[in-house]
Image (cartoon, rainbow, N blue to C red):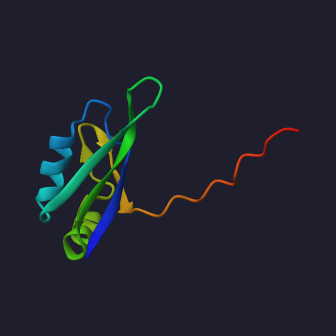
Amino acid sequence: MVKSIFIGSIPFNATEDEIRKLFEQHGPVHSVKLINDRETGRPRGFGFVEMDEESANNAIAALNGTQFQGRSLVVNEARERAKKPPMRRRP
């Protein structure tokens, strides 16, 4: 089963390849997605990695709180986004 991992406090100049290499030390990586701001296109400092469950658990335990390019990473299991309530239209 594939597990999604949240990574926060990513340095703004980090690349998806660098994140992939960091996580591949703990098992095969299915995907890496760094999130950019919609309006500016600049990195937002967080992203997601998908790995098999056992590898993901190992990566979370090993990498949470570690230093990467001068920043302390936040690494944990990704949670589903809370659904936003529908927008109300003004009469």
Query: Is 75 left or right of 31, judged from the image as shown?
Result: right
Farthest residue to the right: give it: 91
Q: For the point 72% across and 46% down, which residue is it? A: 87
Q: Which of 2 and 46 is in front in this view?
A: 2
Query: Is 79 left or right of 72, judged from the image as shown?
Result: right
Q: Quadrant of residue 85?
A: bottom right
Q: For the point 24% across and 43% down, which residue is it? A: 68
Residue 58 x/y as whole percent:
22, 70
The answer to whether 33 is drawn above or below residue 53 in the figure is: above
The answer to whether 90 is drawn above or below residue 59 in the figure is: above
Farthest residue to the top: give it: 40
Farthest residue to the front: give it: 91
Residue 5 x/y as whole percent:
33, 60
Image quadrant holding the C terminus, namely top right
Query: Is 53 left or right of 40, judged from the image as shown?
Result: left
Image quadrant holding the N terminus, namely bottom left
Callout count? 0
Residue 6 x/y as whole percent:
37, 56
Q: For the point 20% across and 46% down, which residue is it? A: 19
Q: Which of 34 and 14 is in front in this view?
A: 34
Q: In which quarter of the image is residue 46?
A: top left
Residue 18 x/y as whole percent:
16, 42
Q: For the point 27% across and 37% down, which residue is it? A: 70
